[in-house]
Image (cartoon, rainbow, N blue to C red):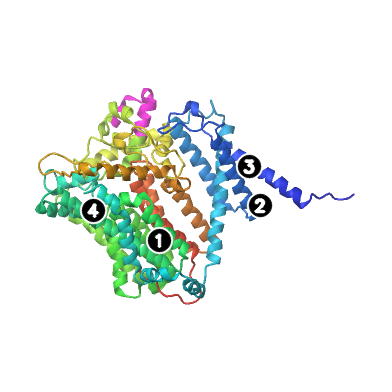
Amino acid sequence: MKEKFISQKQAKILFAAGSFLLAILGSKSFVINPALYIGKSAIPAATTDYLWGFFTLVLWAGFYYTYGALRLKVRMAEVLFGLLFGVMNFLGTSLFAYDSWAFIGTTLSWGEALFKCIGQGMVMATALVLTANRLCVQAAQNPRREERKQKAAAIPRQLKGLVKLYREHTVLFCATLLWLCWLPYMAAFYPGSVIYDMCVMVREFFGLEPMKTWHSLFITYVFGACMRAGRLLGGDNYGTLLYMILQSALMAFALGICLRYLHRLGAGAGWQLAALAFFGVTPIWGCYAMMIGKDTVYTALLLLFTLQTLTLAREGQKAFSGAGSLAGYGVTALLTCLWRNNGMHVVIPTAALILLFLVRGKGRWRTAAPLTAAVALALLFHNLLTPALGIIDNTGSGIYSIAFQQTARTVRDHAGKLTEEEKAEIDRVLDLERIGNVYERWISDPVKDTFRQFSQGADIEKEALARFRKTWLSLLKKYPATYLQAFIGNNSSYYAFTPKYDGITHNQQAGLRFVFTNYWESGEGELHTTQPQWLDPARRLMMGLAQRWWTLPVLSFLYVLPFYTWLLIAACISLARQRRRRDWVAFMPAFFSFAVCLISPVDDYLRYFLPIIAMTIPLLVFVTHPRSRKAEPSSQI
C-alpha cells in the first residue's frame, strides 16, 4: 500500500487556511458585547465592524509569519505568560466593560469564557514568541566595532560635524536637544501646571498647616525652597518656574545619560535615533517637563539608578572602578528613596537582589557599601529625623488603598448580608454610609477620603488599621470574588488592554492623562500661580497635539501602558533564551515599580507608570547587546 503525501504547495495552503482560522478565533475572543457595555469609554465596535476584520488580517499575518515563515516554536514560558495574559486581560476588560463578572454563567457560558481566555492567550503567546526571538536574533547579530567604524565612514559630509559633536559630547548634546524639544510645552504652560499635591506642600512648608509625611519631607523642602526664592523675586510664578527649569533639566540630563549608555553599549544608529525621537517628540516627555509635581524628578532618578544597575550587570567591577562612581551609585539610590516614599519599595528589594545574584566575590562587598549606606541613611531620615522634627506620620493608611476598595465594593454589593457587628467595625474606620455610594472601581481616593483616623498620628492610625484588618480578613473569606473584582478593577489597565477612559471620574484622575489643569489656592500664603491668558492659543495647540497622538496608527501604542509591561516580559524571556538569567536583576527597578502601580490608588495612571516607560528602551538594548567575550571599554554612568 502506497503512502500518500501532500505536496509542499498543498501544505502551505493548508497552513495558511489553519492560520486564518486561528486568526478568526483569536479576533473573536477579544469581542466585547456593546449592548451591555457600561464602561467609561466610547462603545466598542460590534462584531460586524470592519475593524475586527482588519484585526483578523493582522493576526493572520502574525501567525503565518511566526509559525510559517520563521517556523518558530512556542516554549513553556510563552505558553504560561500567554495564558496569564488571556485570563487577566479577559477579567480586566470585561470588568471595565460590565463592572461585574456576574454575566459569566448567565449571558456568557463558562465554556465561552474559557474560549476567550485561551484565544487571547494564544495571541499574546505568539507576540511573545515573535518579540523574544527578534531580540535574541539582534543579540546574536550584534555588529562588531570594526563594522560600526565602516558605517561611520559612510556618514554624509554635511552631517559629520553634528555626528562628531554627538559622539564627543553625547550627554550635553542630547540633553540640550531634548530640552529644546520640550520648550514649546514649557513656554505654553508657563510657569507650569501644578498638581494639587504641591499646594499641600506649600501650606506645610510655610506653616499654614502641620507638616505631615504623606508627601516626602525631602521634596517638600526642595519645592518650598523654590517657592521661597520665587517670592523673594516677586511671586509664586517665579518659584514654580524655577522648579520647572530644575526638573526639566534633570530629566534631560538623565535621558542624555541614557543616550550615552546606548552609544557606548554599541547600539546601532537606529536604536539611538529611535530613542532620541521617542524622548523628544512623544508628548509624554514635554508634558511632564512642564508638569509641576513629584514624578518628573523621581523618574529621572530611578532611570539613573537603573542605568547604573545595567552597567554593573554588563561590565561587572569595571563599571565602578573608582570611588566616585561607587559613591554616585549610592547617592542616586538615596535620592530615589527620599524623593518619593515608594522609592524605598523599589530600591531596597532591588539592592538585595543585586547583592544576592548580580555581583560575586570581592565585588559584592564593594557594591554593598554604597547601596547599604543609601538604604541606611534613607531609613534614618524617615524613621529618626522625621519624628524628631515633630512631623505627623500619616502614611499608615497609604498601603490600604486596595483593602479600602474591597471593603467599599463589599458594602455596595452585599450591604444587606453584612452583620451589625461587621457594619460597626467598618464604620469605626470608614464612613459606612458613604463608601458604597462613592466607590469607583478605577480610583480609591473617594473611599480613602472617608478614613476617620487620617492625620491623627501614627499610633492612632495603626491601632485603627490593626482592628480593621481583622474585619477585612473575615469578609475576604465570605466574598472572595468581590475582593478580586475590586483588586483587578483598581489596576487592570497596567496589564490589560482596556479602552481609553472617557467620561467623568473622581477629579478627572482615572485613566492615562496629562495634567493640563493648574491648581492654585487663593488664601494668604498659599500657592497662587497664574497662567497668562494670552498663552491660551498656545496651550490649546499643545493640548491638541498631545490628545491627537491617540489617533495616530501604531504611534498611539506609545500611550498604552500594557504595551510596555508585556514588552519587558518578552525581553526577560529573551534573556532566558540567551542563558542570561542573572541579568533579570537589572529589570527589577521596572518590575518593582510595576508592583507599586498594582497597589497604587489609581488605575492606568501615567505619572505612576512613567519610570517604567523611561526604562524600556535601555532595557531592550541591554537585552540585544550581551557582553562580548573580548574586552570592552567600560561604559561608566
Span colored in magenta: 406-426
Q: Is residue 329 above or below residue 451?
A: below
Image height of 261 relative to 494, above or below: below
Residue at the top extreme of this rendering: 416
Residue tagged 1: 353
Residue hosting label 3? 22
Task: Give the image quarter of residue 518.
Answer: top left
* Label 3 element class: helix
Q: Is residue 91 magenta?
A: no
In the displayed orientation, state which residue is furthest to the bottom: 631
Foreground residue among 55 and 88: 55
The span from disc 1 to disc 3 (Cα, nearest Å) is: 41 Å
Labels 4 and 3: the sequence-earlier one: 3
Residue at the spot of label 4: 244
- Amino acid type shown at disc 1: Leu
Q: In this image, 233 relative to 545: left or right?
A: left
Q: Amino acid at mark 4?
A: Met
Q: Residues within 10 Å of mark 3 (few under 14, many from 20)?
A: some
Mark nearer the viewer, 1 or 3: 3
Mark 4 or 2: the one toward you: 4
Residue 564 marker: none
